[in-house]
Image (tube, rainbow, N blue to C red):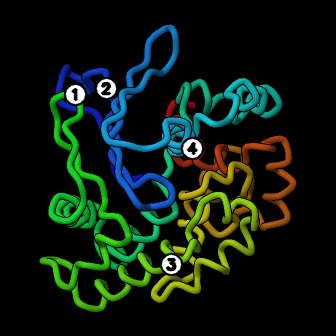
Amino acid sequence: MPVGPRAGPAGDDGFDGVMRLAFCLDGYTEQVGVELRQDDAGVRGVVHGTGDLDAIRRQVARCLSLDHDGREFEAVGRRDPVIGRLQQAAPGLRPPLFYSPYEAAAWSVLSARRPAAQTAQVRTRLSRAWGRTFELAGEPLAALPTPRQLLEVTDFPGIPADRIERLHGVAQAALRGLLDPDRLLRLGPVVATSEVQRIKGIGPFYASLIVIRGTGFADLLAPDESRSLDLIRQLYGLADLPSPAELEELAEPWRPFRTWCTVLIRAAGRRVLVSS
C-alpha cells in the first residue's frame, strides 16, 4: 500500500467522504496537500500549497490509478471469467500506488526488516518533524520531507545511522533525476529496475516495488510472487503453481492490465474462493 491517502474519522465505516493526500510533488522541491471528494459528477479536489495544478492532477491520478480508462479494465473481465468474478467481488478496485518513486524508495529504506505498521509510524514522525503538515478537511496530514529537507536529517529516533545514510542516498538520487517517474516509464520496467538498484541499499525486490508501485506500469506480471501464484493456481484450478511461461499464457487476456489483475487477485482472490 502507498503511504498517505486516508480518510478521516466519521461513520461506522470510518470514511467521512474525503480522501486526504499529502506528498512531494514530482520534481521533489515542494509539498502539497489534496482533499478529494467524489459525487455523481466525478472526482473533485481541493489543493493546499502551491504547484502546477495540471502536474498535481496528473500525480494524483497516477497515484490512484485514475489515469486509465476503467471501461477497458472491465473488458478484461468479460474476456476472462475469473477476472470478471473478482471484479464483481471488488467493484471499482484500482491499484493504489506510492505518491512517487522517491517516496517508494524512502519507504523501502525505512521498511527493510521492519513491520509495516512500525515503518508507517516512523515515516509519520519523520514527516511531521521535517516535512510539511497540511490541515485537510479538519485533519492534519504530514507530507514526506523533500530530498533537500531529508539531507538535513542527521539523526532521528527509530532510524539507525546506516538507514539515515541510505535515505540520503535516496534524496541524492532524486535530486539527480534518477527517480523521475516519467524517466523511469520511458526506460521501461527492466532498465528502470536496474537503474534504481544503483541506489545503495536497494536490491532487486525493493527496486521492483519502486518501479511498479511508484510509476504506474499497468501491464506487468509478477512471476516470483508466491502468494499471487498460489491464488492463481486455486482460482484457475491448476494442479501446480504456474511456471513463468504458463503464467504468461494464462494472463494473455489480462492485457493491457496485467499488473491490475495481479493486484485484484491478491485483494479479492481469497474472498472469491471462500464464497465458491
User: Quick check: 36 above or below 166?
Assistant: above
Q: Secondary structure under badge 4?
A: helix
Residue visible at 59% across and 77% down? 196
Classify mark 2: residues with Cα within 10 Å, few (<14), some (14-19) or many (20+): many
| Number of the label disc, if any, that sits on residue 18 | 2
Give me the C-alpha separation between circle 1 and circle 4: 22 Å
| Number of the label disc, if any, that sits on residue 173 | 3
Quadrant of the rendering where the C terminus is positioned: top right
How far across and how far down the image is residue 203, in percent?
Answer: 54, 83
Give me the C-alpha separation between circle 1 and circle 3: 34 Å
Q: Which of marks 3 and 1 precedes in the sequence?
A: 1
Classify mark 4: residues with Cα within 10 Å, few (<14), some (14-19) or many (20+): many
Q: Secondary structure under badge 3?
A: helix
> Which image quarter: residue 255?
top right
Amino acid type shown at disc 1: Ala
Q: Which of marks 2 and 1 precedes in the sequence?
A: 2
